[in-house]
Image (cartoon, helix red, strand yellow):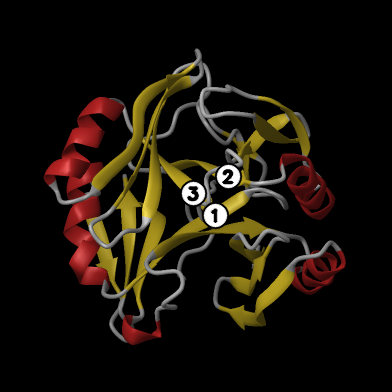
Amino acid sequence: MTEAGGSAGPIGAAHARYAPGTPCWVSLMAHGLTATQEFYGELFGWEFRPGPQQLGPYVRALLDGREVAGIGQLPPDRHLPVAWTPYFASDDVDTTAETVRLCGGTIGVGPLDASDAGRLAIGSDPSGAVFGVWQAAAHVGTTITGVPGTPAWNELTTYEAASVRKFYETVFGYEETVVSADVDHMTLHVAGHPVAGIHGVGAALPRDRGPHWTTYFEVADTDAALGLVVDLGGQVLEPAQDSEHGRVAGVADPEGAHFSLIQGTR
């Protein structure tokens, strides 16, 4: 992980429209919608209201009345992984989806309209990591960042960073990629700002997960949040540790969806 919070902007910042290639939304598909809302509501202080139902029951999470993330319910007969999925902004989701295919990725859902909110597609890169594409209309995406309970960063964990770098640069038009000198890591930039990371871990990649995106959520106190995760039925996957970007930990919710917590160094 690197540059956590780099795309968040000022504390409590509200967003108008996201530049193409910028992570603009995160969504979780779970089996138990009510129980999942209770978990994240207690952990992050979220409240919920119904969202577009094109993919089934779906709610938007709000913090102080502003939209932060989405949670949907998987169909009972679909045994899909429960996971957080980042959505990247696009001015034309149909063109982006076609570029995904041309670059060796796949599109599993869409492109389709989500009521008057916007247009979306869900796909995967050539290594199999799942992500979404969002073309905003009435709904621009996450409308507040930089405070506890909001997405702070998205990181792709894959076999080798260089092997998927060209894919993301071509699909989303990243004009700069900063490569770390000492580890297999690169940071994707939009308009000079870091927006996401790619981390190659080789054989250390968990076989039961494969390449995947991880969303980092900001918290006021990582250690306190870890205790709350456990109390609410979740798991600690990676104990809290200090980094140059803040105190970070990896966790899973009661259904097994992985995500990370970060207490920033602001």
Q: Is residue 184 above or below residue 41?
A: below
Rendered image: mark on residue 83: 1
Mark 2: few, some, or many residues within 10 Å (few <14, many ≥20)?
many
Rendered image: mark on residue 29: 2
Q: Are marks 3 and 2 in contact (CB under 8 Å)?
A: yes
From the image, tell me which residue sits under label 3. 85
Q: Given the image, on which type of amino acid does mark 3 rest? A: Thr
Q: Are marks 2 and 1 in contact (CB under 8 Å)?
A: yes
Q: Residue furthest top?
A: 116
Q: Closest to the observer: 121 or 62? A: 121
Measured as percent of width and height from the top left, residue 68 is found at 64, 39
Residue in view at x 31 percent, y 59 percent: 128
Q: CA distance from mark 3 to mark 1?
A: 6 Å
Measured as percent of width and height from the top left, residue 40 is found at 76, 50
Q: Label 3's element?
A: strand
Q: Is residue 48 above or below residue 136?
A: below
Earlier residue among tags 3 and 2: 2
Residue in view at x 39 percent, y 48 percent: 131
| Quarter the C terminus occupies | bottom right
Q: Label 2's element?
A: strand
Earlier residue among tags 2 and 1: 2
- The image quadrant of residue 145 is top right
Q: Is residue 126 left or right of residue 199?
A: left
Q: CA distance from mark 2 to mark 1?
A: 6 Å
Q: Label 1's element?
A: loop
